[in-house]
Amino acid sequence: MIKYSFLTAKNGSIVPALLQPCGNTKPLHSTIDPVREAQKLLATIPEDTGFIVFLGLGGGFAPLAALDSGARVAVIDFDKSAVNQLLASKDYSQLVNNQNFTLLTDPANGEIQNFILNNYKPAIHGGIRIFPLRTRTDQDKELFEAAAAEIQKAIENTGGDYSVQAYFGKRWFCNIIRNIANFPNNEAYNFFSKYIKDAAIVAAGPSLDTQIEELAKHKTRGTFIICSDTAIGVLLHNGIKPDAVVSIDCQHISYFHFLGYNISGIPLILDIASPPMLGLFSSAPLWVASGHPLARYLCAKWAALPCLDTSGGNVTYACLSLAENLGAQNITLFGADFAYAQNRTYAKGTYVYPYFEKKQNRFASLEAQLSAFLYRNPFLPAEPGQKYKETAQLKFYRNKLEEKTGITIMPGQGKPVQILLSANKKVQETQNLIKQGCSPIEFLNNYRKDITAAETNSEVFTTLLPYAAFIKHRNPGLKGKDLIEETKQCCIEEIDRVI
């Protein structure tokens, strides 16, 4: 158990000191001028660091100095009784009353990671730093090392998300705004009232070529077939009509999956951030919400869209989420290699073949273009006897699916994968899809006004963060209020183009 005594520094500040079993004390800060010591510490961090995590509360001198610099500050400490002893020793009101300060005491497993993921916004805060109060952290080394590891894991996850936002932030926003403006009627959403037991999920990996016959048997048995947009051409070419197609990519390359095929009678499940023109390929386009903050916002304020879990980062994962939402228990996974088996990227009949056929010439044959497409990203080192090529991204996709299902996927094995899920029916109340009864244009007008007045800690401003990441990536010099105003202005102009 941690116990403190309290000393008075030469500048009059109260300095906590650890009580040792032998009766000696270890001050946590300078006993001359702990305020100046904290200022010197903060002077060592880069200018663009706007989020700081301190391990150990101590006298709160460094966290207070960080708040004065405009940073978002969190302190993590352990032993609630010891923290209470600190809080009773001096006035910490300047810390605890600041809206940019958070104290996490004895955090539960996962609490630190969730806090970082929910509060650290790279586009707004810039860099993030961890400062341990060494005299304190040495007393509970294992606890603080585990906390630091959890912070690091959260930073890695946030960094990955930020990289994607920096690339797609503008496109997501523009697509969502246009899809809201052209929102369809409610009747088509009765699709989500279906209940299925057996489902087949079809990805577009090379192994699908050898699994088509097995998939056709499932079709004749009445299995509900959900395919990825990449796989639609393979199925239709082989005379198999899926019961639903899922597309979640915001890029216009998605058009190539559907060109030349008639899918007008097939329900097309589209992320609300998908390119608007994709909805024209089907007579039954169904917009769904993924994890984009604007999608979640419009679900809460205007249209209760069905939600798909796209956290796996790929369309196969989203297909599995759809099967779950429809109550499926027995699922068979086809073409799910998550690797380049047989030195090929996709099954025959996917968009890459006609795409490169049209581009081939004497200097760039079809085979040469397919090979260049295969080698466009570096491969991970192969294990002895490994018969497939794997990238870090594909491995991430596979790991996420394995975490969700609890199964192990063997890339390129050539056999469908069986998944058993407990019944988990999520009924969508389609009759109340539009919550407030206003038209799409009215909603956009209201949203435009809310953006103008939005504070940085508001729900509305959160919907702009991916766009802010896009702007920050292209103009690193923009910071603070300038970045916020630029983001608001760009989003308002985009809405104006639509309405």
Image: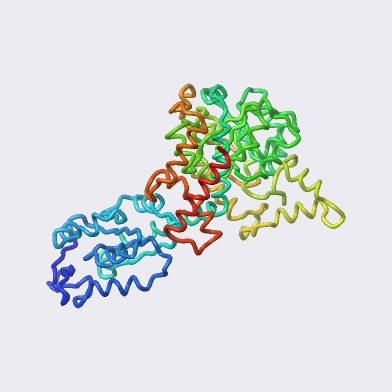
Horizontal and vertical percent position of residue 289 = 51, 37
Number of numbered labels in the structure image: 0
Q: In what quadrant of the picture does the C terminus appear? A: top right
Kindly indicate the quadrant of the structure image that contains residue 166.
bottom right
Q: Is residue 318 or residue 23 the one in the foreground?
A: 318
Q: Is residue 449 or residue 389 the one in the foreground?
A: 449
Kindly indicate the quadrant of the structure image that contains residue 209.
top right
Horizontal and vertical percent position of residue 461 = 43, 47
Q: Is residue 240 above or below residue 203?
A: above
Tell me what residue is drawn at x 75 percent, y 33 percent. 237
Tell me what residue is drawn at x 58 percent, y 47 percent. 171
User: How is the structure coloured here?
Assistant: rainbow
Residue at the extreme right of the image, as rendered? 362
Q: In this view, does 152 lie above or below 492?
A: below
Residue 196 in view of the camera: no
Horizontal and vertical percent position of residue 389 = 66, 54
Horizontal and vertical percent position of residue 103 = 27, 55
Tell me what residue is drawn at x 32 percent, y 59 percent. 73
Tell me what residue is drawn at x 54 percent, y 31 percent. 323
Q: Is residue 404 left or right of residue 242?
A: left
Q: In what quadrant of the picture does the N terminus appear? A: bottom left
Q: Is residue 192 or residue 213 the one in the foreground?
A: 192
Q: In this view, does 138 lie to the left or right of 350?
A: left
Residue 60 in view of the camera: yes
Q: Is residue 342 left or right of residue 384?
A: right
